[in-house]
Structures are given as C-alpha cells and as structure tokens.
Amino acid sequence: MSFETDAPQAPRVRVSPQQWRLKLTPAEYAVLREAATEPAFSGEYDDTTTDGAYVCRACGAELFRSTEKFDSGCGWPSFFDPATTDAVIIRPDLSLGMRRVEVRCANCHSHLGHVFDGEGYDTPTDKRYCVNSIALRLQPSSTATAAIELRD
C-alpha cells in the first residue's frame, strides 16, 4: 500500500463509550466504535446518486461529497477522495490476517471503512474509500449548502 498513514492525534470530539451507546444504535456502535463491517449490498448509500455531503453519523463532520462518489460494484459506498484533506485519518489495520488501511473520521475517530489504492478504477486518484453506509448520513445538496453557510 502506498499510503502514508496519519500521525496519531486526539479526537476533537471526545465522548465516553457509555455516551456513544446512548447516541448510536447497536449496529451503528458496532461499526463506528468497534470497527465492525456491515454486510455488502445492505447499506442505504451503496447505490445512492443523490447530490450532497456525506457526514459522520456519530459526530456530523463532513467526510465525503457526492461529486467524489463512484460505483465500484463492491457493495459499499465508494469515494475516490474525502471532502477535504483533513476530513479523515488513515492508519494501518492488520486485523483478519491481512494488511489494510483503515479510514476514520478525523473529528471523532469513528471507524468508517478502508481505503484501497491502485485497483485500476477510472477515477482521478485511483483510490477507493470503501465506507460503511451506516457510518454516514447523507445531507442532500440543499441541506449541505445550508450547513456550510451556517459554519461560515
């Protein structure tokens, strides 16, 4: 893998495991806080083509945009780049007896999925951020624009 992994940093949003359990459903908690994976082709955003921003389901930080989403056919939403360079952090994942690169929300360090490089997709980056739908919430363009305006 040709990725440089991000240096460890403390999450900007710090919530106790008990608080996360109150905020998230058991399935959301399993993926976002325990790095589980939802079954392929089961998530609500796998084949969504709605314009907008994809935010972290745990903390609401903008992670990806529909303009970087593409159909990889893998069964999970795929993006070729995050919304901004500091939206996500990546780190080595040696679980399941293989070497992968995990993607986490930079804001709260919730597990999102994995990123793969050099698979030959016709995208500007040749990267595939393979993200669990349950880790995201789609804000359609009109809502995403309003949220951006509120932050400015």
Image (cartoon, rainbow, N blue to C red):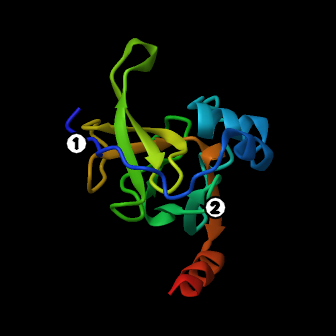
Gap in angstroms between the C-alphas marked 2 and 1: 28 Å
Residue designated by label 1: 4
- In this rendering, the answer to whether 94 lies above or below 75 is above
- Judged left or right of residue 125, residue 31 is right
Q: Position of residue 48 (x, y in %)?
A: 61, 55
Q: Position of residue 114 (x, y in %)?
A: 43, 37
Kindly identify which numbered label has been placed on residue 138.
2
Q: Position of residue 74 (x, y in %)?
A: 49, 35
Q: Amino acid at mark 2?
A: Leu
- At 50% from the left and 63% from the top, the residue drawn is 66
- In this rendering, the answer to whether 53 lies above or below 116 is below
Q: Secondary structure at mark 2?
A: strand
Disc 2 or disc 1, which is closer to the eye?
1
Q: Secondary structure at mark 1?
A: loop
- At 45% from the left and 15% from the top, the residue drawn is 96
Label 2 packing within 10 angstroms: few (<14), some (14-19), many (20+) = many
* Residue 52 placement: quadrant: bottom right
* Residue 72 placement: quadrant: top left
- At 55% from the left and 45% from the top, the residue drawn is 110
- At 53% from the left and 46% from the top, the residue drawn is 77
Counting residues from the start of the chain, the first of labels 2 and 1 encountered is 1
- Judged left or right of residue 131, residue 89 is left
Q: Position of residue 35 (x, y in %)?
A: 56, 31
Check contact, mark 2 vs mark 1: CB within 8 A. Answer: no
Which residue appears farthest toward the top when viewing the image? 97
Which residue appears farthest toward the left when viewing the image? 2
Q: Amino acid at mark 1?
A: Glu
